[in-house]
Amino acid sequence: MIATRAHCAGFAVALTCLLAGAAPADAAGCAFEPQGEGRVAAVIDTRAFRLTDGREIRLAGIEPVAGARAGRTALVAIITGREVTLSGDSDSPDRYGRQPAFVHLAGGDTPVQSMLLAQGEALVSADVANRDCSATLLAAEAEARRAKRGIWADPAAIKNAESPGDILAGIGRFTLVEGRVVSVRQAGATTYLNFGRNWTRDFAVTISRRAAAAHAAAGIGLKSLENRRIRVRGWVEARGGPRIEVLHVGQIEMLGGN
């Protein structure tokens, strides 16, 4: 069990206890440099809160679920009034003055991020460069998806790569898309994973030379993705057809049934 000063009472805290079985992996997966501690005074939104000393913290590694109100409620239930510890790659504030961090309840090993993901109230973001941490967060998200919790109760939570119009409706949103890669092509310094034959209309993933090298270092040859079913996550852009740019290895997941 996670060692906290509160008993496992109420849904959110009960979930904290439930996730304790994964604590060793979580501790190893998202272990970063300490960034301090404090008591949570108020929750600002679905992934940000204020400490009693005035610092504003943003939960690193996750994206809020578009249009969902439950995410803020879930975060309130988990952390309001609790002592927390912070860690991360950097304590430099974002453009809103909020410090991005991985957050743990005092004495606990499971990140608050994993708790929200396990409830289906958040998505793993596209900017988790640490592979172990990415795997930890993706495992929590996958558990919620299997149990159809939160966002995953909606069959349309993941977009079909064969429906570019549906994907384009989410321009500017963080989105998950699944489908079979029809072809892999390189143009200059960019590799394209094409999910259709019409390159000006169909969905495609773009990967820079640097990101391609990172995939190769991780044992993923981009050419090997041809005819494979994958899941990709990121921000939807319109460049003729819908596009998602892949910057990190964790943005692409191999799917079964290839």
Image: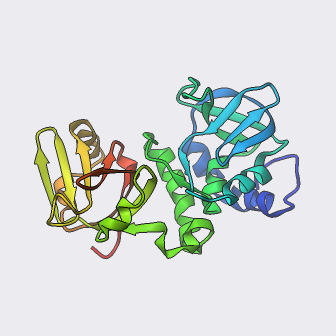
- Residue 87: give x, y in percent of width and height: 62, 32
Tell me if residue 50 comes above or below residue 45 in the rendering: above
148 and 204: which is toward the camera? 204
- Residue 38: give x, y in percent of width and height: 78, 31
Lateral position of residue 139 relative to residue 121, left or right: left
The image quadrant where one finds the C terminus is bottom left
Q: Tell me what residue is drawn at x 59 percent, y 29 percent.
A: 96
Lateral position of residue 79 relative to residue 95, left or right: right
- Residue 41: give x, y in percent of width and height: 82, 36
Toward which corner of the image does residue 145 lie, by quadrant?
bottom right
Tell me if residue 51 comes above or below residue 117 in the rendering: above
Q: Tell me what residue is drawn at x 70 percent, y 56 percent.
A: 20
Q: Is residue 42 visible?
A: yes
- Residue 180: give x, y in percent of width and height: 26, 69
218 and 90: which is toward the camera? 90
Lateral position of residue 166 relative to residue 220, left or right: right
Q: Tell me what residue is drawn at x 48 percent, y 48 percent.
A: 125
Toward which corner of the image does residue 207 lie, by quadrant?
top left
Q: Tell me what residue is drawn at x 76 percent, y 56 percent.
A: 1
206 and 27: which is toward the camera? 206
Q: Is residue 110 visible?
A: no
